[in-house]
Amino acid sequence: MASDHRFAKVEGWLSPPDYSTNANLARERRHPGTGTWLLNSPAFREWTVGTRWHLWLYGLAGAGKTILSTTILDHLLQIDTHTTLAFFFDFNDARKQKLENLLRSLAVQLYHTGNEAARRLDSLFTSHDGRRQPDTNALSACVDTMIQTAGKVFIIIDALDECIGREELLHWIGGLRSSNTQLVVTGRPEADLRCKISLLFDKCNCVLRNKKVVNADIRAYVTATLEQKPGFVDRNLSQDILDRIRDKIGDGADGMQVLTQVMNIKSFARCLSPKDIKIALRSLPRDLNETYYRMVQNKSSAIRLLQFLVHTRRPLTLPEAVEVITTEINQEPRGFNVKRRLFQAADILRYCPSLVIIAEVTNDAETVDELHLAHFSVKEYLLEQAQFDLESASIVITKTCLTYLADIRGSHSTIRSDFPMARYAAEYWTEYAASVETSEGIVRVTVNFLKDETTFQRWCRLYQADRRWDHKSGPPGAPRLYYACLAGLPGAARDLTTEGADVNAQGSQYGTAL
């Protein structure tokens, strides 16, 4: 009992990201048998017995590398002669994008491998008084010593290309000299990764997922989908149409990204007639970029939701995402209206089919559904489009948040529970507005919002901007000008001053606006 209590304190101190959410999502999307080719390959078998030290599995975007990582993880977890550790870098989650996040996760995983490993982490905890956070160097040194006590260790690290600060990560990988540790890493063959990992691992340990195995996995998925999924089975499609789909997607993949072909077959389930399917077969997108292009054309609500997801400060919960599309800022009638809410929150997937996913995530012992972009390549594609640059998206997000805050109704005590995006909008609108203060339109919208007594009071009661740690509601503690300056809104501060705001007025945490 005492050791469990100690572990809870150490885990709370390090607050590691939970890699299992990524693995669970991959398991849900994995077709049975996917990745068997790898487990049976000479390279992997040689790696498991130690004749190969490390492996790098690489492939283009959408090639199914995360599913392969999970297949390897599940295989290794069935063997009890070693310790298996894992981490998934994730562009959707800022808590899973740095070497520090990886080290925190590995440290907590290693804590359970034996008393000596636990003592090493306990020592780090004690040396920092259980309060101060260790830097990356201290974490790295601790993890290295814990690994040395853990016997044979396999480490799976997925999506190196989604790590921020890859140079630091590659340096850490290069420093893993313990003879009892073997790595499998995955990622796209970005120039820096290709160059450095080839040197660290040797080229013979860099394994490209080739066309033959990609095509085999795609054909197996297509066959199972046609034979089992209600969208196909219930329609009693003719054998001719089934054969055409199987031949075009299953046999005609020619090494295309798995993600592209999965999206292609899902699109057939949305066809309303045999003729529609035949037309779709003749005009399949050539690659991921063309697939994404077709999905976001002329869909204003979908585009606005995607702008949020690309530039969000933290992952949106599913209820928050529903509020985004319930708020209209371009077409009449503008504003937020609860009558626009979806009957079923999960139907939000229909706005951006195949581009977004619902992920079940556990944070601080609470499990919530979040809306994520389906793949790193989705974000990359969107960022290449003009309407998804930071300025354009920030204007849209600012207007959406302010419109939402202006239109929600109710007592201060019930607004948070009745309107799921209230806290998010109150906390983050100023960050987006500050990045587009060159837009006089945004300055006007911001000033009008601050000058309106109702919206100003509502915002401050939802979020204490100068006491971010304080989640208790309360009235504004300072004048409007104070908050405009605090948020970094010089345009709004200028207009408020021109209209007579007192720059010397006292209030709240930092005194005057100056």
Image (spheres, rainbow, N blue to C red):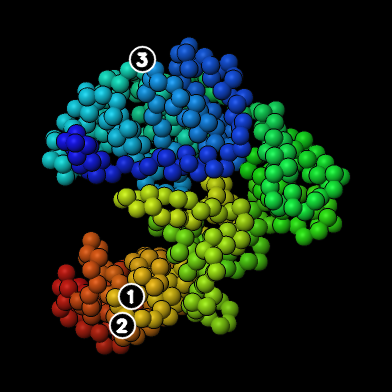
The answer to whether one can see residue 179 in this image is yes
Say which label, 2 or 3, has the lower sequence index: 3
N-term mark: 3 or 1:
3
Identify residue for label 3. Answer: 179
Badge 2 amino acid: Leu
Residue receiving disc 1: 414
Identify the image quadrant of the N terminus. Answer: top left
Tell me residue 446's x, y (percent).
38, 77
In the image, 270 versus 435, the foreground residue is 270
**Image spot of residue 351 (x, y percent):** 60, 62
- For the point 81% across and 50% down, the residue is 237
Asked whether residue 189 is in view, the answer is no
Q: Is residue 202 left or right of residue 269?
A: left
Give the secondary structure at mark 3. Answer: loop
* Percent position of residue 62, x then y: 60, 41
Q: Would you say the residues marked 2 and 3 are in contact, meaning their CB atoms lie under 8 Å apart?
A: no
Mark 2, residue position: 496
**Circle 3 Cα neighbour tier, 10 Å, few/some/many (<14 / 14–19 / ≥20):** few
**In front: label 2 or label 3:** 3
The residues tagged by marks 1 and 2 sit, at their Cα atoms, a distance apart of 31 Å
Residue 194 in the image: above or below residue 371: above
Residue at 61% x, 37% y: name it.
31
| Residue under the point 25% across and 40% down | 11
The image quadrant of residue 109 is top left
